[in-house]
Amino acid sequence: MERRTRGGWSRGGLLCALCCVMALTLFRPASEARGQGGGLAGRTVTGTVYFVGGRRAGQSQAFTLNINRLSSPEDVQRLQAALQSGGQDELLRTLSRMEAGRIRLGTGVGVVANAIISVPQDGGSKLVVLYERDLHISELRYGTRSQDYRFGYAELYLRRGGNEGMLIPAAKVRLRDGNTWEVEDFGAFPARLIGLQVRGGSRPVR
């Protein structure tokens, strides 16, 4: 089975080729798909998001992810089927009916984290977070190109020895070769997630 790989850098933005991220979760037994991430439900991940490029380059904000539940293999299958049948528009409609937690940048109320998918890895877990981002009024009023980038996307690597991740605040999602999720960043580089700590439960995970 294919492993996840990253695409190349381009002037138009970063292409993150997510080979079988969803398929890897989908085709595992339910217990294994939740795997080491099973204990994360009901916990909160905090840290800092640092913007590498774009109009906020060099800026940082507080990052918070509240995990109410982990998306089930059935949820992942519905998302995969939606993207296959109707592309990004159908994926958005299906995703908008899901709720797994809440993601917040800075001090605002944040937005619903529609899907939080746990992928077991050696020594920890990777969380894939996909959500419907809020469009600014100016994007809708002036029909800017960014309004085609309807998703937010994050990867969090939670493991012994240090937690880190990346965030794409405005992303476009498409399917390539039938089972490859390709996420295109509207900006030049994804933001970094640093200093992540998992709180709640019996003790914090650092």
Image (cartoon, rainbow, N blue to C red):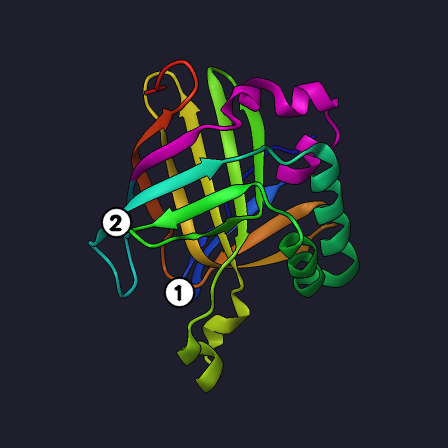
Q: Secondary structure at mark 2?
A: strand
Dominant SS of magenta comes to helix
Q: Give residue 167's position: percent from left, percent from top.
A: 40, 47
Is 96 inside the magenta-drawn segment?
no
* In the image, residue 158 above or below residue 142: above
Q: Give residue 6's position: percent from left, percent from top.
A: 50, 44
- Report the magenta residues as a range: 20-47
The first of marks 2 and 1 along the sequence is: 1
Q: Which residue is identified by label 1?
A: 11
Residue at 33 percent across and 17 percent down: it is: 161
- Indicate the amino acid at tag 2: Gln
Q: Residues within 10 Å of mark 2 (few under 14, many from 20)?
A: some
Residue at 71 percent across and 41 percent down: it is: 75
Q: Quadrant of the C terminus?
A: top left
Residue at 53 percent across and 27 percent down: it is: 41
Q: How many marks?
A: 2
Question: In this view of the protein, can residue 170 be seen by the observer?
Answer: yes
- Indicate the amino acid at tag 1: Arg
Q: Which residue is identified by label 2?
A: 61
Query: Which marked residue is nearer to the observer: mark 2 or mark 1?
Result: 2
